[in-house]
Image (cartoon, helix red, strand yellow):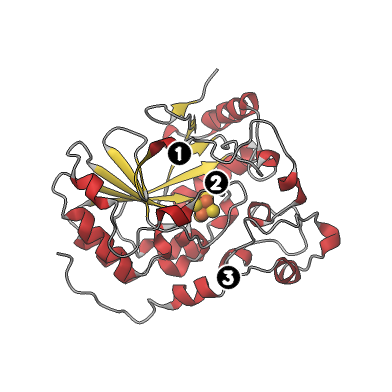
């Protein structure tokens, strides 16, 4: 049982920020001193703009090419139909073990803890995921599958983003998972502590501390400008929980060696281990972010020559049906 649900004073600030995200493109452009003449926008509302103000505060005003802005701005290029860029590039429909539960790899399962995110990343491989069909609700029906399979030692909370869940909801979910004796590790994939740093609270740290499961947090950061002093400071609140980072190699955002080197060094200063550098998944609407594999390998060689090994993320891609991430090399 996870003890003592306490409520330190600042714990609700992140929820206010989550409610106050920018969803109107014109509001975003105004904040950044840009106009519609500076950018070519899509008219589609299928995967609408969503970005927290704290993240916007790290964008350069007056720069339509800002690498943080490019990650969230719905551009007209998303409307281009490109062969090979599909709705479900990782064929996750074939990995569904139960409602809200995906099993892609041996010994691990992934729970779609929520369909909601704090930010909508334009390159997201789940941008077309049928979240409504995978709602867990408060009973977490998918967990029965995990209890029935003793080979599962690790549960991954993903989504959507599990850290948009309230602390109470997260605690209940972790209680259900830790009650399964064969589960040893709990991994959270999240972008929230980067885009809304106030989500890193003492209560969250206590929740992680209190579970018998070994907790690992995998952050998602693509550019060094995302990690400012405030993000680094807030992450310290999470104490000794191991923090890893996965990035996506994105054309026009981080596809140069200096940007990747800066990212690794900045992550490490914030005590985050650069872990994966993913080739972008070929999801419909995101072809304009694609980086050719030869270019990715060349960049990876450059950063490997410039950085110590522990700062070099593994260059990988996810291949449907493979038994793990596939390393990319010639
Ligand atoms: S936060 Fe993660 S799941 Fe949500 S849109 Fe971004 S990449 Fe996709």
Q: Residue at x 20, y 40 (%)?
A: 149
The answer to which of marks 3 and 1 sits earlier in the sequence is 3
Q: Nearer the viewer, mark 2 or mark 3?
A: 3
Mark 2, residues whose alpha carbon is within 10 Å: few (<14), some, or many (≥20)? many
User: Relative to residue 26, is residue 103 depicted above or below?
Assistant: above
The answer to which of marks 2 and 3 sits earlier in the sequence is 3
Q: Residue at x 57, y 68 (%)?
A: 54
Q: Are marks 1 and 2 in contact (CB under 8 Å)?
A: no
Residue at disc 2, secondary structure: helix
Residue 151: x and y, percent? 20, 36
- Asked if one can make out residue 257 in the rendered structure from this viewpoint, the answer is yes
Residue 136: x and y, percent? 35, 58
User: Which residue in the structure is indicated by mark 3?
Assistant: 21
Q: Foreground: 193 or 141?
A: 141
Q: Which mark is residue 263?
A: 2
Question: In the displayed image of the protein, which residue is found farthest to the bottom?
Answer: 9
Mark 1, residues whose alpha carbon is within 10 Å: few (<14), some, or many (≥20)? some
């Amino acid at each position: 049982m996870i003890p003592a649900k306490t409520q330190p004073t600042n714990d609700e600030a992140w929820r206010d920020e989550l409610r106050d995200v920018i969803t109107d493109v014109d509001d975003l452009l105004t904040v950044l001193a840009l106009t519609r003449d500076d950018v070519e926008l899509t008219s589609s509302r299928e995967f609408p703009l969503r970005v927290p103000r704290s993240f916007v505060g790290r964008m350069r005003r007056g720069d339509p090419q800002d690498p943080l802005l490019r990650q969230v701005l719905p551009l007209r290029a998303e409307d281009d139909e490109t062969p090979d860029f599909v709705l479900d590039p990782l064929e996750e429909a074939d990995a569904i073990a139960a409602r809200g539960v995906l099993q892609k790899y041996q010994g691990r399962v992934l729970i779609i803890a929520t369909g909601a995110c704090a930010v909508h990343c334009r390159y997201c491989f789940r941008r077309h995921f049928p979240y409504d069909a995978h709602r867990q609700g408060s009973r977490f029906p998918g967990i029965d599958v995990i209890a029935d399979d003793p080979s599962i030692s690790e549960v991954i909370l993903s989504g959507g983003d599990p850290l948009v869940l309230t602390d109470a909801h997260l605690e209940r979910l972790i209680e259900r998972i830790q009650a399964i004796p064969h589960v040893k590790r709990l991994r959270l994939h999240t972008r929230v502590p980067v885009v809304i740093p106030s989500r890193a609270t003492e209560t969250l740290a206590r929740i992680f501390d209190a579970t018998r499961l070994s907790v690992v947090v995998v952050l998602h950061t693509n550019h060094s400008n995302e990690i400012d002093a405030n993000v680094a400071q807030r992450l310290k609140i999470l104490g000794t929980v191991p923090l890893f980072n996965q990035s996506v190699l994105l054309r026009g955002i981080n596809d140069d060696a200096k940007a990747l080197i800066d990212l690794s060094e900045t992550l490490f200063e914030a005590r985050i281990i650069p872990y994966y550098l993913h080739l972008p998944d070929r999801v419909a609407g995101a072809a304009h972010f694609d980086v050719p594999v030869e270019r990715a390998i060349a960049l990876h060689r450059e950063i490997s020559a410039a950085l110590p090994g522990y700062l070099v993320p593994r260059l990988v891609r996810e291949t449907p049906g493979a038994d793990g991430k596939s390393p990319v090399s010639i």
